[in-house]
Image (tube, rainbow, N blue to C red):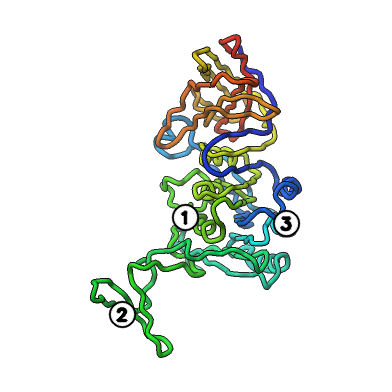
Amino acid sequence: MRLQQINVEREEQEGRGPSGEMRLGDVRALLPGLIERYAGQVQVIYLDPPFRTGQTFVMRVRVGEKEWKSGAGSLAQTAYADDMPFDAYMALMRETLTGAKRLLSETGVIYLHIDYHMHPYLRLLMDEIFGEANFLNEIIWSYQTGGRARRFFSRKHDVILFYRKSRKYYFNLESVPVSRQDTRRNHMKRHVDADGRVYRSIKSGGKIYTYYDDEPAFPGDVWDDVSHLQQKDPQRTGYDTQKPLRLLERVILSSSQPGDLVCDLFAGSGTTLEAAWLNGRRFLGTDLNPYSLQTVRRRLNGANVTYTAPECAGSPAAEASAAPGIAFYDVRLEKYEVEPGVCARLFSGLDAVDNWAVGYLREGAFRCMASDFRLRQKPELKTVLQLPVLEGVPCLRVGDVLGRYFYYALDCAEGDQR
């Protein structure tokens, strides 16, 4: 028989590493709850808000095994329209930055990633909210990707505004070394010492400075050694505005220590959260777009994380069976059909399924016990997951290619749920 949908707004996934949380919704509506729970606890906040470019950005969704194998997504879904009126945009950023300051600890810092569209306005707003004396850097992230202009110089950089909350802020430049061979030589002379080590020298102000090639260098405020993601980069999730993992690792490693809390209020493709998790930091993310939640789930598969999201609208047709085994139920996803009129495209088999999971409903939360995602390395979706026999209401969750997620109760005592 067809599965019956249930309303679940919180999902808990046990895993390795520090704990984290992802909440789906408008940041302005979420901030009061975040401040109540996390005020004064966040060490690093990285914000990559809309740039107010006037463009509409899309998520290129891969559908089914064939597209995950090729890496090319054919289903273009709107991620967000970046055309907010100026006054509304500034009101959004004022409220977000004011809330961000309340979340920061006394040793905390904030990085605001923007481009030329709103840079001058947000620089002044940051001075107003955090204090001009707490400005640390205007970091230039320089890259070579993108088109070439003919009527003006090509725009090939973003700006990252770096502020502290107080003079007690934590910062460790030595945690983000770069190869000295990757840095510019500035016409320095090359030498080899008696031990065969290569070094460079330069005379400045009457003094001679020497730098050995095998010793680390450290980044300045122009970051031209971190490339923009190419279209076929393995990191690509389908988000137009996705940032490289290496960029966020530099931010996080330089400004936090293991176990610290890292926050991204415009989580997007989830790069900040993944960088925090991979480097032993706790993480907190929010975003308005359901595709963000879907992408973050994939990138944080195996992490210790809680997801909070409102119920999705819709009523797709789903069928499953549950066969009892020794200490496990073998749950088979038999059918998932997108309801007519929701999408002009037709999907065959289980192509409409991006990911699915089985677990138990306990105290209003879905406790995930097993899950499967389509991946470039593993494009085929498992149709059977093992659910251990435990206390609670057995449940199944399906995430589809339209960015939606639905929960269903399983009556494992009856076996066949079709």
Q: CA distance from mark 1 to mark 2?
A: 31 Å
Query: Element at badge 2?
Result: strand
| Residue 102 marker | 3
Callout count? 3
Q: CA distance from mark 3 to mark 1?
A: 27 Å
Q: Position of residue 53 (x, y in %)?
A: 61, 57
Disc 3 vs disc 1: which is toward the camera? 3
Please report whichever mark, 3 or 1, sits nearer to the chain's N-terminal start. 3
Which residue corresponds to mark 1?
246
Disc 3 vs disc 2: which is toward the camera? 3
Mark 1 crowd level (few <14, some 14–19, many ≥20, 10 Å Cα): some
Query: Element at badge 3?
Result: helix
Verify CB contact (< 8 Å) between mark 1 and mark 2.
no
Q: Residue at x 49, y 43 (%)?
A: 237
Verify CB contact (< 8 Å) between mark 3 and mark 2.
no
Please report whichever mark, 3 or 2, sits nearer to the chain's N-terminal start. 3
Query: Element at badge 1?
Result: helix
Which residue corresponds to mark 2?
189
Q: Residue at x 60, y 65 (%)?
A: 162
Q: Amino acid at mark 3?
A: Arg
